Image (spheres, helix red, strand yellow):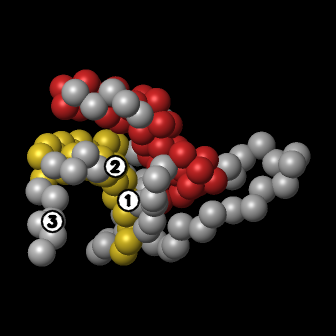
Amino acid sequence: MNAQPQLLHSREAFYRRDRRSVRLARDFTREALTDWGTPERTDDVLLCVSELTTNALLHGVPPGRGFLLQLTLATDGVLRAEVHDSGPGEIRTPDPGPETEEGRGLLIVAVVADRWGVGERCPGKNG
């Protein structure tokens, strides 16, 4: 019988709908990874957190609301970064044209992360 990995560390922070929140979320993530002694893929994790928080701010956080960033590290070494927003709708990975200047954030997350997905919550969604 295989034992399920246990939660080793967990942190969360709530951010307002403000463009400075993306930098604050990256700083929070960097500090957690340093404290947890998991520097292996810090740049990849920071890039994913940056893209997911930017996406939440641009598309998932209505005025007057914010988003939640949750980081967890399991005993098997799996790090999970979740961004919870309160906006309606589904997250779709766009297919931007070569001349388009935006719409690549989730494509970057899909390439950099080992796995990623979207779950529903009330209100909103998490990615």
Mark 1 is on which residue type? Asp
Seen from this angle, which residue lies furthest front? 1
On the image, which quarter does residue 82 sit in?
A: bottom left
Q: Which one is earlier in the sequence, the residue at label 3 or at label 1?
A: 3
- Residue 56 point in image, percent of width and height: 47, 53
Mark 3 is on which residue type? Gln
Q: CA distance from mark 3 to mark 2?
A: 19 Å
| Residue at image mark 3 | 4
Quadrant in which the N terminus is drawn: bottom left
Mark 2 is on which residue type? Ala
Task: Name the residue located 37 percent from the left edge and 63 percent from the top edge.
Answer: 126
Is residue 45 shown left or right of residue 79? right
Return the mark for residue 97. none
Is residue 87 shown left or right of residue 95? left
Task: Name the residue located 36 percent from the left edge and 53 percent from the top edge.
Answer: 83
- Residue 125 point in image, percent of width and height: 39, 68
| Residue at image mark 2 | 81
On the image, which quarter does residue 115 sit in?
A: bottom left
**Are circles 1 and 2 on residues that touch, CB within 8 Å?**
no
Secondary structure of the residue carrying tag 1 is strand
Q: Which one is earlier in the sequence, the residue at label 3 or at label 2?
A: 3
| Residue at image mark 1 | 85
**Nearer to me, 87 or 5:** 5
**Nearer to me, 52 or 89:** 52
